[in-house]
Amino acid sequence: MMYLGMFLTFAKIGLFSFGGGYAILAMIRQEVVVNHTWLSQTQFMDVVAISQMTPGPIAVNAATFIGYHKGGVFGAVLCTLGVILPSLVIMLLITLSYLKLKKQPWFKNIFRNLRLLSVGLIAAALIMVFGDAMRDWFSVIVFAGSLIAGWKYKMNPFYLLISAAVVGMLFG
C-alpha cells in the first residue's frame, strides 16, 4: 500500500503541476513534508539542493530521491513514473490537439493563460525556498554573488553550482 500511495501522490503532483520543476516544488513540499511527513523541511531543502545539482528535471530528480528515501529502488522507480506519466500523456494529447487547433483564437488564449499561471507558481516556489535558504549573512552573500555572476556576467549555471559548493565547503 505504501508503494501505491507513493505512486499516486507523485502522479497527482505530475497531473496538477504546471510550469516546470521549480513551479512544482511548492506542491511537492506540501505533499511530502506537510501531508505525508515523509521528509522534514530540512530534508526537503536538501532534496531541492541535490535535485538542482544533478542532471535532469528538478521534479523528476526530487521524485526519484524521495522515492528512494522512502521505498528503495522500487520506490524511486514508482515515484519517478508517477511524476512523469501524467505529463507524458497530457503532452501527447496536447500535441495532437495543437496540430489540429493551433489557428483557433480560443486555443491561443489557453496557452497565454497557462504561461501566466506558470509565472505565479514559480514566484510561489521562490518565496517558499527563499525564506528557508536565507538563514544567515553567509547565505545572503553567496546568493547575492551567484545572482550577480549569473545575471550580470552570464556565468554558466554549472560553474555557479560548483563555485557555491566550493565556497560553502571552504567558508560555510
Image (cartoon, helix red, strand yellow):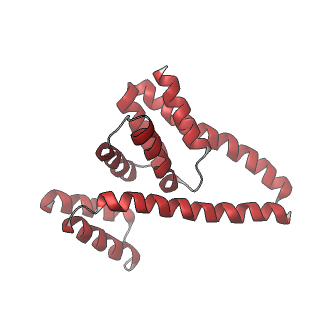
Front-most of 74 and 131?
A: 131
Picture layout, residue 142 above or below residue 68: below
| Residue 81 appears anywhere in the view | no
> Looking at the image, how many numbered discs can be counted on the residues?
0
- Image quarter of residue 73: top left
Front-most of 18 and 124?
A: 124
| Residue 156 appears anywhere in the view | yes
Q: Where is the C terminus found, in terms of image quarters?
A: bottom left
Q: Is residue 162 left or right of residue 85?
A: left
Q: Is residue 4 left or right of residue 147?
A: right
The x and y percentages for residue 51 are 39, 48
- Residue at the (38%, 35%) spot, across then down: 37
Q: Is residue 55 left or right of residue 18?
A: left
The x and y percentages for residue 18 are 60, 53
- Residue at the (34%, 51%) spot, across then down: 49
Picture layout, residue 36 above or below residue 147: above
Residue that lies at the very extreme toward the left in this rendered image: 171
Residue that lies at the very extreme toward the bottom in this rendered image: 152
- Image quarter of residue 103: bottom right
The x and y percentages for residue 139 are 24, 64
Front-most of 136 and 149?
A: 136
Residue that lies at the very extreme toward the top in this rendered image: 1
The x and y percentages for residue 95 are 75, 50
- Residue at the (38%, 29%) spot, across then down: 70
- Residue at the (52%, 37%) spot, across then down: 10
Residue that lies at the very extreme toward the front in this rendered image: 35
